[in-house]
Image (spheres, grey):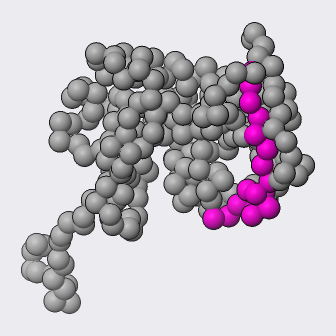
Amino acid sequence: RPKGGWAGGVRPVLGTFPIARVSNGHTFFIQKLHDIVGVPPVCVHTTYQYGDGDKYAYGKRERLRDAGLWLVDPASRYTSGSYLQLTSSLARQLSPNKAELLLPALRDEAHCVMAHLKLNALQRQWLQVGFLLAHALGRTLVLPPLWCVVDRFWTILDHCLIGSKVEMSRPFVCPLDHSFDVPAMTAQLPEWREHTFFASQRIAPQLAASTAPVRVGAAVAPDAASSAVPAPAASAPAAALPVVTL
């Protein structure tokens, strides 16, 4: 209280907001606490992120695009173009606060750090092949959801998380800046789209509906297929691409 009291008889009231509704960058983008407790978020700060450059906030933009909150992009970004969407996944979400790894080699790993490193290495290989395939097909790559086992923080982690009482699933879908240098990717790689691109409310219905499956190799399981969007016709037959040594 200032000397002489508050001007005009004003009496400010201080309080706290529920963190699931007025979130920081970790509770919203990493924990997704609003989904766990089942409340609609009101606002979010793009804190706890690691992808900004010295010339542009690439990490903040990428996270907001993932969440469907970046409204600065022109409408043409969602109404035209040809895309290759990677649909394979190494994990699956069972509930808002529970997920599981799908490969035994990852599930059976004794330490979370080793599981994370193996998971990250596989996903990097997929993205490398995905960018090459997209370039060869003349399409823009739509990233798959990227999974993490280890959180990212500026100080010591507690059993691979930022705290022992953090409520979140593990593995979890992590932002691109958790595992990649987003400014370097932006400068050196072809343009890509976020993994939630086709779930955007701005996407043109005809663009989302025009699909054709593409499988790499002759013996690829159905859950390891990739889907190219759009195709010349929605009923186009599947195309099989041979496996090549890169």
Residue 188 quadrant? top right
Quadrant of the image containing the N terminus? bottom left
Q: Is residue 91 above or below residue 234?
A: above
Residue 144 in the image: state x and y as whole percent: 59, 38
Residue 240, can we see it? Answer: yes
Residue 223 quadrant? top right
Q: Is residue 19 above or below residue 58?
A: below
Residue 173 in the image: state x and y as whole percent: 45, 40
Q: Which residue is depicted at the point 42% across and 43% down?
A: 93
Determine the residue located farthest toward the right in the rendered image: 232
Q: Is residue 181 above or below residue 47?
A: above
Range of magenta residues = 201-217
Q: Nearer the viewer, residue 146 or 218?
A: 218
- Asked whether residue 210 is drawn in magenta, I would say yes
Q: Which residue is depicted at the point 31% across and 47% down?
A: 97
Q: Nearer the viewer, residue 42 or 109?
A: 109
Residue 13 in the image: state x and y as whole percent: 17, 77
Q: Which residue is depicted at the point 23% across and 43% down?
A: 166
Q: Nearer the viewer, residue 58 or 200?
A: 200
Q: Which residue is depicted at the point 24% across and 64% down?
A: 18
Residue 192, can we see it? Answer: no
- Asked whether residue 180 is drawn in magenta, I would say no
Decide if residue 198 is on the left or right side of residue 5: right
Residue 111 in the image: state x and y as whole percent: 29, 17
Q: Nearer the viewer, residue 241 or 188?
A: 241
Residue 246 quadrant? top right
Determine the residue located farthest toward the top in the rendered image: 245
Decide if residue 13 is on the left or right side of residue 71: left
